Image (spheres, rainbow, N blue to C red):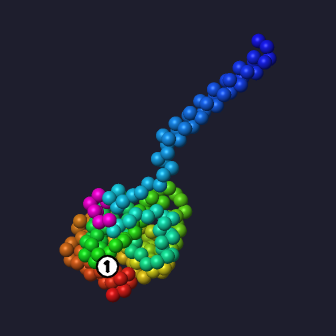
Amino acid sequence: MNVKVKNILIKVIYAILFLIMLVCFVYLSEKYADNSKDEVYTIRDYYSTITNDSFVPVNGTRFIHLFKNGKHLIFVGSKTSKWSSNYITELDKIVQSLGVDEVLYYDVNNDKAQKNSNYYKVRDLLKNALITTDETNNNLLAPSFYIIDNGVVKYYNIDTVAMKNTIEPETYWTSEKESEFALEITEAIYQYYLNK
């Protein structure tokens, strides 16, 4: 085989390999295109019983931005926690009765599970309104509720965070506790969020 034919054959092989790689690239790009899109979650992705669209899930990055800008109601929850499920059910009743348009929902497990820095940044932003569970750290736990005004925590409720492992949520949430909770949260929302 002469050199000219050999060079042409090599170029043809390279062209075929290039086309195969191009086809594979296009195929894999289309197949995995959905993986690069940000998923849009609704509160029903976390709590199927909540149908109120006032609850808006936010990731850690969005939480940090919104915390510093404007007035917000923030519920920190954990979709795997029975306490969070009970808490948001009670909070939902209040939000609906007051006609509140938006409550940010931050699932504490998302950033914590990914071991990214957003969890620690959120924890630092809320550091003066957290429960101490050991001798050195304030811990961001769920469920908790915050009213924020331009980077300042105006109100927080972490009452049931301390109840974990000592009582079941169904036992804790008596009609009396529900009424006390509704009164406290309603007054806080009026005072710090609605300015009434």
Quadrant of the image occupied by residue 55: bottom left
Q: Position of residue 104 (x, y in %)?
A: 40, 69
What residue is shown with label 1? 185
At which x and y percent is residue 131? 43, 74
Drawn side of residue 16 relative to residue 107, left or right: right
Q: Is residue 152 above or below residue 85?
A: below
Front position in the image: 49 or 8: 8
Q: Residue 196: where, in percent of width, then height?
A: 33, 87
User: Was residue 103 drawn as part of the magenta stretch in this picture?
Assistant: no
Residue at the farthest bottom position: 196
Q: Is residue 144 left or right of residue 150?
A: left
Q: Residue at x 21, y 72 (%)?
A: 174
The secondary structure type at the circle numbered 1 is: helix
Q: Amino acid at mark 1?
A: Ile
Check disc 1: other Cα within 10 Å, few if <14, some if 14-19, many if 20+: many
Residue 122, x across and y down, in percent: 49, 69
Q: Quadrant of the N terminus?
A: top right
Q: Is residue 189 above or below residue 133?
A: below
Q: Which residues are magenta?
A: 46-53
